[in-house]
Amino acid sequence: MNKTILKQALLFEDDNPVSSKIKDLGELASKYQNENELYFLHAKRREKAVIKNRELFFGFLSQTQQVTVESFEDIHNILNATCRSDNIKFSGDSKSNFVRVFDNVVVIKKRGEIAKLYQSGDLHELSMIDKFVAIENGETFLNIDKFAEYFDEDYFIYLAGYANTLTRTFLKTKKVHFFIDLDIESMNIYESFECESKALHIPKDIEQYFSDKAYNNVELYKKQRARMKNVYSQDVMPIIELIQKYNTVVEQEILYDEGSA
């Protein structure tokens, strides 16, 4: 996460700043727009910069800064929270609420035990553990023992959306099973991770959840569809194809809900 980028983004909250005041943000946005064939920020020299599409703008910040941003309030929370490492808040929806998990903390839960916070100096305690289930949402993470029978792994790690730097670095040498929402933003999250090996957790009967209005979420799909990329890995394509087929998404907590079993 680059604080300068986020601070420059905040300049748009009450006004349209001149391009010289958002130099770093403008250069990064220009590159991102070209690579993804998008247009959400107009920024030319000696002119005021203008956000043309706020949803795409916040999506750009989320992906490039590895945080979850859907509003200027989220940016304020992120910048304020980085100096309050004793204030960790778990959220049931990592994409609509800011989750305060910091670069110096990894949150891990062993099957049948309570969750623990690990700082960088503590991670050697987990050096012999090479397999983890990565969980996106806080509520699901805290209640994972209810669903543990569906996983072979004994250790679960909390992502809180795109995850913090320490968590991402820790997982680079691990074999990771991703239990995340089956939506566009979560597929982007999955694609952004580097691991020794990784795989998506996809139930065999997943199409029934996409096809049934009792389980899918059309409104969330509408909010996210502009963030769909042109190219995805083979791991992700089965979910992308279902999203495109049904024009909807499925959140992880519904998969093993007692009412949907």
Image (cartoon, rainbow, N blue to C red):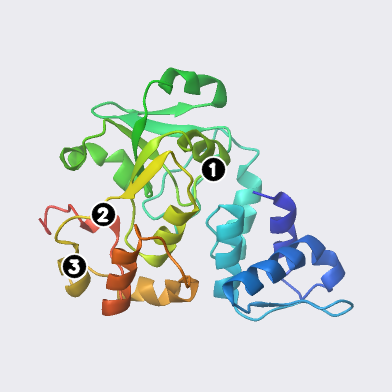
Label 1 or label 3, whichever comes before in sequence order: 1
Q: Position of residue 239 (x, y in %)?
A: 30, 65
Q: Is residue 247 visible?
A: no
- 1 relative to 67 in the view: left or right: right
- Which residue is the site of mark 3? 207
- Spatial distance from mark 2 to mark 3, Cα to Cα? 16 Å
Q: Position of residue 224 (x, y in %)?
A: 44, 71
Disc number lying in front (2 or 3): 3
- Which residue is the site of mark 2? 253
Neighbour tally class for label 3: few under 14, some 14-19, many 20 plus, Cα within 10 Å: some
Neighbour tally class for label 1: few under 14, some 14-19, many 20 plus, Cα within 10 Å: many
Label 2 or label 3, whichever comes before in sequence order: 3
Q: Is residue 240 visible?
A: yes
Residue at the right extreme, as displayed: 46
**Quarter holding the C terminus?**
bottom left
Q: Looking at the image, which is closer to me, 86 or 55? A: 55
Q: Circles 1 and 2: CB distance less than 8 Å?
A: no
- Spatial distance from mark 1 to mark 3, Cα to Cα? 31 Å
Q: Looking at the image, which is closer to me, 77 or 226? A: 226
- Which residue is the site of mark 1? 164
Disc number lying in front (1 or 3): 3
Q: Residue at x 35, y 75 (%)?
A: 219
**Could you tell me the amino acid type at mark 3?**
Glu
Label 1 or label 2, whichever comes before in sequence order: 1
Vertical placement of residue 92 versus 57, above or below: above
**Could you tell me the amino acid type at mark 1?**
Asn
